[in-house]
Image (cartoon, rainbow, N blue to C red):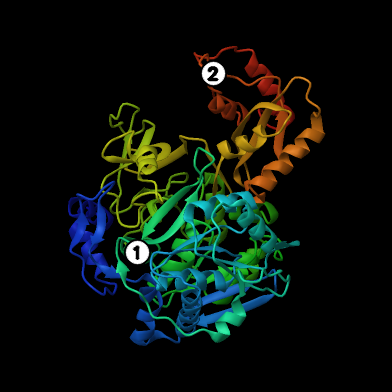
C-alpha cells in the first residue's frame, strides 16, 4: 500500500484522529470540545467549541515566530506597470490598521463586509481585516454588473462595503463606483458606509455621510487586535451561480477551513513556509480566497497577486516572466490561461526567454482540462502538470495528484484520485453504486471533510434541497462522471445548467431570465457549447413573439447588450440566434442537453419523448450557421 492510499484510508476510517492531528499545527485560543460533531445539522461540524481567529494564524502567528521580515505578498501589475511587496510584519500592520477603520465604522463580530475590488493588495487586506474582527466578508468579483451586485447586497446585508474607484483591463478602465452606486440604489438593503480606495487611474465621486476615503481613514486609524470566534462561526460568504436567478451564498467556517487550507498546501501542492506560490486567479472567485489569500499565508508562503492577463500584458511570456522574476515554485491557474498562451505562442518561443528552473509543478483547475492542452503544457514546461477538481462549495480539491504525499502517474483528462476526507462515490439515479467505468452522479459520503460548506447563508432548506435531499447521507456534487479500475476519477459534465466559462461558473438560467425580459422574445434557451479557449461559451436561442418589432442582427446585438448589462462581461455572452421553435419533450421540457450535443458534434440519440423530431433539423442548421454543429 502506498503512502497516499494509507493516508486516504486512514482519513475515512478515523476522521477525528486524522483532522485533529492536522489542526494541532495551528494556534487556538481554546481547544475544541469535539473534533467532529456528528449530531450537528444540517451536516456534521468540525472543531465545535474551539476558539480561533483565521487572521491571527495567517499573519500574527508568523510574525511572533520570528518570520516577520519574510515577504508575505507580492503585487505585480503589468496593466499599471507597478510592483509592491509586503513582509509578514508590514502586511499584519496594514491589516490591523484597516481592521481599526472597519471597527470605527461599527463593524463587529458577526457583521458582514462586502468587498467589491480589483486585484490589488487592498482587496486581500480588506478580507484579512474583516476576519481579524471576527466579521464575515463577502467578496464580489469586480466584473459583475450592478444588478448582480445588488442581489448579493440584499442577501448578505453588509454593514460596510469596501470598493475601489476602478479596475483596469489591458485596454480600458472600468469605473467601479457608478456600478456600486447603482447597485445600492437598486438594493433594498443599504449599507451604513462605503470605504473607497481611490486609484490614480480614475477618481470616484463620494457621497457625503456614506462614503469614506480609504487612505484618509487609514492615516487616522488605530490598530485592532484579533477577535476570537468559534471555529464553526462563518469566515466568509461566497456567492455561486444557482439554477434559479437567486445566487447561492456558500458559507465557509473559520476552524475547518483553516485546517484544510494549511494541510493542503504541503500535502497537495508540496509547498512549505518560505516557498513562493502563485494562484493566477481573482480574489472574487474561490481559488482567490483559498489560494491567493488564505492557504499560502496560513502556510507561511509568499503569495502573488497578479493584475494582468496570461497574454497581452504585454505578450504570451507574461506568466513565465512572473515565475522567473519571483522564483515561483508552484503555479495554479485555469486551463483557459494555457489555451490562450498556446494559441498565441504554439511553439513556446517566449518560454525559452526565461529561466523556470525554480518551478516544480503546474496545477490546473476551474474547468476540465482537455488532454491536448495538458500534454502541450507538459511538453513545453517539462514539469508535472496536475489537473485537479474542486468546487466553490468545497473550498479545496476533491480530487488531485497529492505531490506532497506521493506523486502518482498522470492520466490526461482525469483530475486524479480523491483527496483525504472525500469519500467519493458514483451513484445511479436510484442511489445504487456504479461499477468501475460506468458513468453516474458523483457524490461524497457524509461527513464532508473540513472546509466544505456547512450550509448556505440564511438558507438551510435550500442547502438541503440542493445538495443533500437526492441521496440521503451524501453530498451531491452536481457533476457526472465515473471512476476507472485504478480508482481515478473522470469528470464528464455538469448535471444542472451551470456552465463553466474560463473557470467561472455561470448560470444559463440567469441568462435566460434576461433574454426572456425582452419585449420581442417569446421563449428562449441558453446552452453551454464547447470552446477551445474558454472551455465553454453560452449560446442563446430565442423564439420571437408574433409581430415582433425587431429581428435579425439588430435584435441579437440588443440581446447581447442586455446580458452584458444585467450579468456583466464575465458571462462572455456573444452567441445568439433566432429560431422558429425550441425542441421539447411532450411534457414541455426544453431539450437543452440534446442541443449541446448537436452543437459540439457529439454522438446523440433522438429523445424518445420529443414532441416533434423535425425541430432538431432546424436547430442543427441554426447552430451550423453560428459555426457549431460541424459548421466551423
Q: Position of residue 361 (x, y in %)?
A: 47, 62
Q: Which residue is mark 2?
A: 588
Q: Earlier in the sequence, mark 1 or mark 2?
A: 1
Q: Residues within 10 Å of mark 1 (few under 14, many from 20)?
A: many
Q: Is residue 311 left or right of residue 258?
A: right
> How far separated are the C-alphas under marks 1 and 2?
45 Å
Q: Is residue 389 left or right of residue 122?
A: left
Q: Which residue is mark 1?
A: 254
Q: Position of residue 385 (x, y in %)?
A: 48, 56
Whether residue 13 is visible, yes or no, is yes
Closer-to-camera residue (318/509): 509
Where 541 falls versus 31 (above or below)? above
Q: How many marks?
A: 2
Q: Secondary structure at mark 2?
A: loop
Whether residue 145 is visible, yes or no, is no
Where 547 falls versus 351 (above or below)? above
Q: Residue at x 29, y 30 (%)?
A: 431
Where 49 falls versus 272 (above or below)? above
Q: Find out whether the residues at labels 1 and 2 contact each other: C-beta distance under 8 Å.
A: no
Q: Residues within 10 Å of mark 2 (few under 14, many from 20)?
A: few
Instruction: Place residue 165 in its image quadrant.
Output: bottom right
Q: Is residue 316 left or right of residue 368?
A: right
Where 216 falls versus 32 (above or below)? below
Determine which of the numbered discs, if any, sits on residue 364 in the image: none
Amino acid at each position: 500500500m502506498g503512502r497516499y492510499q494509507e493516508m486516504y484510508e486512514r482519513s475515512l476510517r478515523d476522521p477525528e484522529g486524522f483532522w485533529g492531528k492536522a489542526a494541532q499545527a495551528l494556534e487556538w485560543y481554546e481547544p475544541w470540545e469535539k473534533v467532529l460533531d456528528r449530531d450537528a445539522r444540517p451536516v456534521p461540524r468540525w472543531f465545535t467549541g474551539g476558539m480561533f481567529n483565521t487572521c491571527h494564524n495567517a499573519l500574527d502567528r508568523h510574525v511572533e515566530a520570528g518570520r516577520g521580515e519574510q515577504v508575505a505578498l507580492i503585487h505585480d501589475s503589468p496593466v499599471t506597470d507597478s510592483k509592491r511587496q509586503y513582509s509578514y510584519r508590514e502586511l499584519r500592520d496594514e491589516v490591523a490598521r484597516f481592521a481599526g477603520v472597519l471597527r470605527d465604522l461599527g463593524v463587529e463580530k458577526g457583521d458582514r463586509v462586502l468587498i467589491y475590488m480589483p486585484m490589488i493588495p487592498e482587496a486581500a487586506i480588506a478580507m484579512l481585516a474583516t476576519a481579524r474582527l471576527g466579521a464575515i466578508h463577502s467578496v464580489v468579483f469586480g466584473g459583475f454588473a450592478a444588478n448582480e451586485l445588488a442581489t448579493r447586497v440584499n442577501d448578505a446585508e453588509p454593514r460596510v462595503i469596501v470598493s475601489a474607484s476602478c479596475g483596469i483591463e489591458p485596454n480600458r478602465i472600468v469605473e467601479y463606483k457608478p456600478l456600486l452606486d447603482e447597485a445600492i440604489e437598486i438594493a433594498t438593503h443599504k449599507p451604513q458606509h462605503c470605504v473607497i480606495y481611490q486609484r490614480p487611474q480614475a477618481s470616484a465621486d463620494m457621497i457625503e455621510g456614506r462614503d469614506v476615503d480609504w487612505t484618509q481613514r487609514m492615516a487616522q486609524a488605530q490598530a485592532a487586535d484579533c477577535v476570537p470566534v468559534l471555529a464553526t462561526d462563518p469566515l466568509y460568504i461566497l456567492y455561486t451561480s444557482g439554477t434559479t436567478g437567486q445566487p447561492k451564498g456558500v458559507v465557509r467556517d473559520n476552524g475547518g477551513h483553516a485546517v484544510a487550507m494549511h494541510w493542503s498546501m504541503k500535502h497537495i501542492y508540496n509547498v512549505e513556509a518560505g516557498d513562493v506560490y502563485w494562484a493566477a486567479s481573482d480574489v472574487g472567485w474561490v481559488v482567490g480566497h483559498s489560494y491567493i489569500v488564505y492557504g499560502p499565508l496560513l502556510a507561511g508562503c509568499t503569495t502573488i497577486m497578479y493584475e494582468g492577463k496570461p497574454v497581452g500584458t504585454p505578450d504570451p511570456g507574461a506568466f513565465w516572466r512572473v515565475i522567473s522574476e519571483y522564483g515561483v515554485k508552484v503555479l495554479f491557474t485555469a486551463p483557459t490561461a494555457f489555451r490562450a498562451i498556446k494559441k498565441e505562442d504554439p511553439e513556446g518561443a517566449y518560454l525559452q526567454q526565461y529561466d523556470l528552473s525554480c518551478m516544480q509543478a503546474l496545477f490546473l483547475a476551474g474547468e476540465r482540462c482537455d488532454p491536448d492542452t495538458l500534454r502541450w503544457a507538459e511538453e513545453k514546461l517539462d514539469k508535472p502538470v496536475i489537473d485537479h477538481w474542486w468546487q466553490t462549495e468545497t473550498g479545496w480539491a476533491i480530487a488531485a495528484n497529492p505531490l506532497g504525499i506521493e506523486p502518482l502517474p498522470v492520466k490526461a483528462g482525469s483530475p486524479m484520485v480523491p483527496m483525504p476526507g472525500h469519500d467519493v462515490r458514483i451513484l445511479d439515479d436510484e442511489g445504487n453504486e456504479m461499477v468501475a467505468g460506468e458513468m453516474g452522479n458523483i457524490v461524497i459520503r457524509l461527513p464532508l471533510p473540513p472546509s466544505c460548506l456547512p450550509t448556505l447563508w440564511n438558507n438551510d432548506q435550500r442547502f438541503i434541497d440542493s445538495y443533500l435531499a437526492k441521496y440521503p447521507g451524501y453530498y451531491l456534487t452536481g457533476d457526472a462522471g465515473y471512476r476507472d479500475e485504478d480508482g481515478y476519477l473522470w469528470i464528464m459534465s455538469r448535471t444542472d445548467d451551470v456552465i463553466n466559462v474560463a473557470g467561472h461558473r455561470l448560470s444559463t438560467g440567469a441568462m435566460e431570465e434576461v433574454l426572456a425580459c425582452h419585449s420581442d422574445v417569446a421563449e428562449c434557451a441558453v446552452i453551454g457549447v464547447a470552446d477551445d479557449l474558454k472551455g465553454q461559451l453560452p449560446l442563446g436561442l430565442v423564439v420571437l413573439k408574433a409581430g415582433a418589432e425587431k429581428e435579425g442582427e439588430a435584435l441579437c446585438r440588443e440581446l447581447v447588450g442586455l446580458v452584458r448589462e444585467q450579468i456583466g462581461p464575465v458571462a462572455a455572452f456573444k452567441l445568439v440566434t433566432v429560431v422558429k421553435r425550441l425542441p421539447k419533450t411532450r411534457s414541455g421540457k426544453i431539450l437543452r442537453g440534446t442541443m449541446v450535443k448537436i452543437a459540439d458534434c457529439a454522438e446523440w440519440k433522438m429523445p424518445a419523448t420529443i414532441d416533434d423530431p423535425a425541430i432538431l433539423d432546424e436547430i442543427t442548421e441554426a447552430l451550423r450557421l453560428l459555426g457549431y454543429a460541424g459548421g466551423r
